[in-house]
Image (spheres, grey):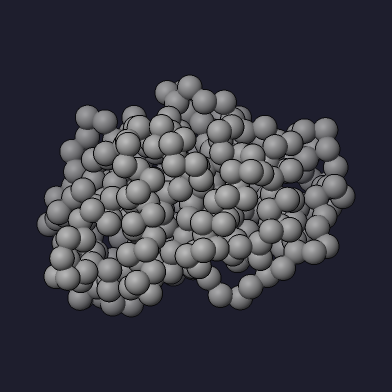
């Protein structure tokens, strides 16, 4: 079995985003050493499909550069990707620095607001927009697959903003990925409204082709196809201090099931002995038993059910039946699919990928 790994090499970040899900988990925590990272890779490379470097801003870390280079030169079959706030363009200062780009298969650039001033205000940095645009152009010159990734919060979830973001993506031949906001107690932001998400997704399907709907609920609603939630099954998260969790968004101490500073083998699922309530097999709420799409949806995204309900015994908070809606209103007959696109995030976390 091969794992898709999300890895934050560093706690450092040069922005202050109100929707950050990992800030608290990264505070008062030391970055893992390069030596520990290398040992983990050496011992587990046979079981790693891909690594996406996210959480914090990895480009601020010399260790990140060294890990990317080490993986590429020693285990080239492992695909590597970066999710960046755009600061990547600031560290590529010479032709010599471009060695980093040849090691990256894909780059996701966080891009939440099409308006430059609003973008900079949301990110808390006056140059955030320019960094993002420069990184897009830099990656395009190096023939790297580029994806604009937008977090759905109240400020971003309107058709005008999404339309203008799609125009930016279209201009530079980028893919477009949506992450639905997951709240925690320290952010001070409310979860997204069901109706807003539904209206945005149905509108977006008229503007884009679908690359992947790797979210079990929305794939079932929109396509009738089953997309597994692989959290803790074939995808995992490594925090900057080396802690391992089953999901990108489940990063508190409650969800830590080991540390790469210890000997961890991915040959056997490291989460299986520790997940009490969370079954890694089928865990379908009783309310879902008679639903016509239960075999495709399986109750919805694991992290959303845990974050919203504190249990897997309830169905996804964006299930139509949780919101006095019905399945038939989700149908979209004009949906278009394309066969090629970014693959590292597909199956790594519940997310939605499009091509304008």
Q: Quadrant of the C terminus?
A: bottom right
Give the residue drawn at x 78%, y 40%.
320
Where in the figure is residue 181, as x and y percent of width and height? 54, 38
Where in the figure is residue 27, as x and y percent of width and height? 26, 31
Give the residue drawn at x 51%, y 45%.
114
Q: Quadrant of the N terminus?
A: bottom left
Viewer can see residue 328: yes
Q: Quadrant of residue 267?
A: bottom left
Question: Which residue is nearer to you in this view: 344 or 47?
Answer: 344
With 8 as the anchor, is 42 left or right in this view?
Answer: left
Q: How many marks?
A: 0
With 45 as the anchor, is 34 left or right in this view?
Answer: left
With 11 as the anchor, is 266 left or right in this view?
Answer: right
Where in the figure is residue 253, as x and y percent of width and height? 36, 33
Viewer can see residue 47: no
In the image, residue 329 sits, relative to residue 347, either above or below, namely above
Where in the figure is residue 120, as x and y percent of width and height? 39, 37
In the image, residue 164 sits, relative to residue 347, either above or below, namely above
């Amino acid at each position: 079995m091969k794992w898709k790994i999300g890895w934050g090499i560093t706690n450092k970040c040069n922005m202050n985003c109100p929707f950050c899900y990992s800030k608290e988990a990264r505070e008062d925590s030391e970055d893992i050493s390069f030596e520990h990272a290398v040992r983990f890779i050496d011992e587990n490379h046979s079981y790693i499909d891909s690594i996406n470097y996210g959480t914090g801003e990895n480009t601020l870390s010399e260790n990140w550069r060294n890990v990317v280079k080490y993986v590429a030169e020693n285990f080239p079959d492992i695909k590597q990707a970066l999710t960046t706030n755009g600061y990547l363009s600031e560290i590529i200062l010479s032709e010599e620095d471009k060695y980093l780009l040849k090691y990256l298969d894909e780059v996701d650039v966080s891009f939440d607001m099409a308006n430059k001033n609003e973008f900079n205000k949301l990110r808390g940095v006056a140059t955030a927009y320019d960094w993002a645009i420069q990184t897009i152009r830099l990656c395009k010159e190096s023939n790297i697959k580029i994806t604009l990734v937008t977090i759905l919060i109240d400020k971003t979830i309107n058709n005008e903003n999404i339309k203008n973001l799609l125009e930016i993506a279209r201009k530079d031949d980028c893919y477009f990925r949506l992450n639905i906001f997951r709240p925690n107690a320290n952010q001070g932001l409310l979860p997204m409204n069901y109706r807003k998400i539904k209206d945005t997704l149905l509108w977006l399907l008229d503007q884009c082709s679908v690359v992947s709907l790797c979210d079990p609920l929305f794939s079932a609603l929109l396509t009738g196809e089953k997309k597994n939630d692989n959290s803790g099954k074939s995808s995992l998260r490594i925090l900057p201090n080396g802690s391992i969790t089953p999901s990108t968004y489940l990063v508190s101490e409650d969800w830590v099931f080991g540390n790469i500073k210890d000997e961890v083998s991915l040959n056997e699922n490291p989460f299986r002995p520790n997940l009490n309530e969370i079954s890694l097999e089928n865990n379908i709420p009783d309310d879902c038993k008679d639903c016509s799409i239960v075999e495709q949806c399986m109750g919805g995204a694991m992290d959303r059910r845990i974050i919203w309900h504190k249990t897997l015994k309830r169905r996804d908070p964006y299930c139509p039946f949780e919101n006095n809606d019905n399945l038939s209103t989700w149908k979209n007959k004009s949906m278009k699919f394309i066969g090629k696109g970014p693959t590292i995030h597909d199956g790594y976390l519940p997310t939605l990928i499009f091509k304008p």
